[in-house]
Image: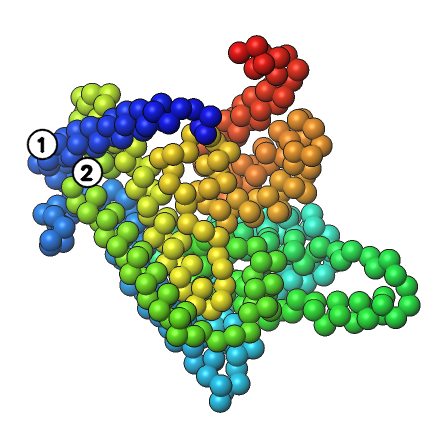
Amino acid sequence: MGSLPKWEIRAYFLVWIGATIYGVLRVLITSFNVTQRVMDGLDLGTWPLGKYKDNGDTEWTLWIHIFGPQVLLGLVGHFAVARLCELPFLGLLRHRFHACAVYTAAFLYYVIGLQFVAVLMFHTVIMYVIARSRVTWFCWLYGLMVFEGLTFEPFRTLQLGDHRDQPYYMPHVTSVTMVTSIMRLISLGLDLCEKEEEQKNEGEKKKKRKKDEQREEPSLFESLAYIFYMPTFFLGPLMTFQDFKQQIRQNQRACGVVDLRDFLVSCARYACWGLLLEFIYHHFFIHMIQRTFFLFQSLDMWTLGAIGFLQCQCFQLKYTVLYGLAGTFARADGIVTPGTPKLIAVIYAFGDMWKNFDKGLNKWMLRHVYIPLGGSRRGLPRQILSSFVPFLVLAIRGGGDISIIVWATANWVGVVLEALARSATRTSYVMGLKVCL
């Protein structure tokens, strides 16, 4: 892009922004004209945002409007417990993450139930014991078995509990939360399995290194603090155990006045992004129009393309709010979580989408799947295989549903085609064509 003339770059930008604005306006006009025809899928709006609201984004409705207040209450409680532990006269600064883990377990017991907490603690202890064997495939086997247990009865009810006497949304909450927790469990086991590099020097240095390793060996309490860390517990972003462990060991300072100011500013910032998404759903009925089949068929290509564009932007904005708020509460504890999604409107490559949307999941896959299988350092065939397995893990995580399998396969094919194209551009024939052109 930098080699293009500036006038050409500006021309492309004007065409892109003009087409975007035109398409968005068509969706706005269409939403206004079909309000009565999609009324069954609309909720009463919130003043002053609008009269009606598209309720088709069930994930946003659940985690913000229905279960969201309880999650927010849990985050505020976590913030209060962490700040109390930082008081000098209590002397609990080094143990604040352990105290926060106890608080999270108590909160989950109150909101979800004892069975869920007990099962998660059981999985953590078992994974910790398995990891002591330093056998990585054993950790993978246990993690994948727990994943599969969520798709079969009675193992699903055994892990998630019986929700007949609980609110209708609780099965979905516990299922999503358990899936995210299992990803952390696998990271815990694999990071604990990593063998330290052997010390080349003999004598006293080697003995000292062994003593340091024994002292720095991750404890079960650190493992529980990682699994039961409230800011990232429900929806993420996903952190590897190695990153979490290093940060809680290195960060031994209390939250200062500047940190509190940044915390409040960040909360206000993501609240504004949330209000923007609410405004969009009050005026652009993109989900209900899509679900009304006869109406969807009658739309022109401009409107259809703009609906798809808006759905992608709303999806990115939703996770910007969810991941951003989680990261804000984590930064108050001195924990830096993976960043929020990059603006996907300017991403055109499958590989860049995976790197920049869910950055925590991307790092998890790189560390635990892609790089251990060889990645791009052992030739193109190994790279293709290494890129296939992460999508296989995602399909298993999604319960093996056919829609998840199709989605994962399509994304993998896109990544492979890009890898093949990059490999082709490095051949002498293509390099010669570049020189000629």
Kind of residue at disc 2: Phe
Q: Nearer the viewer, residue 269 or 178?
A: 269
Cα gap from disc 2 to disc 1, whole angstroms: 11 Å
- Residue 322, compared with residue 436, is above or below; it is below
Answer left or right for 416 relative to 283. right
Q: Position of residue 210 (x, y in %)?
A: 80, 68
Q: Is residue 164 visible?
A: no
**Disc on the earlier residue, 2 or 1:** 1
Q: Position of residue 86 (x, y in %)?
A: 47, 80
- Residue 38, compared with residue 96, is above or below; it is above
Residue displayed at 47% across by 26% down: 3
Residue displayed at 56% across by 64% down: 247
- Residue position marked by numbered label 2 in the rendering: 285
Kind of residue at disc 1: Asn
**Residue 109 image-quadrant placement:** bottom left
Q: Position of residue 351 (x, y in %)?
A: 51, 33
- Label count reads 2
- Residue position marked by numbered label 1 in the rendering: 33
Mark 1 residue element: helix
